[in-house]
Amino acid sequence: MEAFYVILGIIVAVIGAIILIYNGLVMKRQRVNQAFADVDVQLKQRQNLIPNLVETVRGYAKHEQETLQQVIAARNAAQAAGSAGEKAVAEGVLTQALGKLFALAEAYPDLKANTNFLQLQQQLSSIEDKLAAARRFYNSAVQDYNTSREQFPGSLIAGAFNFEGREFFDVGTESRAAMDEPPKVSF
């Protein structure tokens, strides 16, 4: 009879461990989903500012249509992106296009002094800071989740219950290099 209780105890302990690991993975997956939603909110706010910024610049730099069209095209691509990886690539391209737009503004002193342009630039800068923080939190949540699903015994539970890995939100090396270097504009 004692052997029965020992075996029953082992079975209950194993089931309890499976439940704890499963619930931990669910919690971490939800944290990743929430973190991505936070990133997405910041991206939408950023994308919503861009048309106003382009229109403000358009009024001063009418012959710079190519740069303005690049910004709009990059914004549209960023809005259409689906997964974290796709959004990261599209946002990297958008960041490069915005860099060109702000470099363009340097050539127009009246534009640089325009109150509306300055307010939009400040709002965009504020959103960029919030976006960077949201990306860091998201990537941290992804790392925690992916590590939990890859470590033993979590890998057994993750495989059995189809817990998929998540992508980091990485703007890519080209976009990072573009952000580190000032854009070159020639007239």
Image: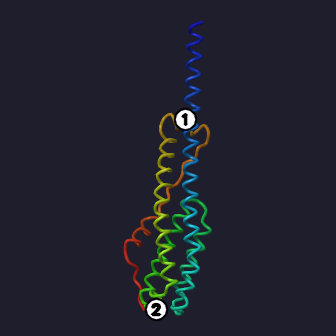
Query: In this view of the protein, which residue sits in the foreground, 65 or 127?
Result: 127
Location of residue 149 with respect to 142 vertically, above or below: above
Location of residue 59 with respect to 127 vertically, above or below: below
SS assignment at label 2: helix
Identify the residue at horizontal 46%, vertical 63% (top origin).
132
Image position of 142 (left or right of 44)? left
As drawn, the label of residue 86 is none
Identify the residue at horizontal 39%, vertical 82% (top origin).
184
* Mark 1, residue position: 21
Image position of 55 (left or right of 102)? right
Residue 63, position as x, y percentages in the image: 52, 93
* Mark 2, residue position: 110
Type of residue at label 2? Answer: Asp
Residue 155, position as x, y percentages in the image: 52, 38
Q: State how far apart marks 2 and 1 are (Cα).
A: 60 Å
Residue 99, position as x, y percentages in the image: 45, 77
Q: Which image quarter is the N terminus in?
A: top right
Type of residue at label 1? Answer: Ile
Location of residue 101 with respect to 135 vertically, above or below: below
Q: Nearer the viewer's eye, disc 2 or disc 1?
A: 2
Query: In this view of the protein, which residue sits in the foreground, 139 or 159?
Result: 139
Image position of 151 (left or right of 44)? left
Label 1 CA crowd tier, 10 Å (few <14, some 14–19, many 20+): many
Q: Residue furthest top?
A: 1
Marks 2 and 1, the one that precedes in the sequence: 1
Tags 2 and 1 in contact by the CB under 8 Å rule? no
Label 2 CA crowd tier, 10 Å (few <14, some 14–19, many 20+): few
Q: How is the image coloured?
A: rainbow
SS assignment at label 1: helix
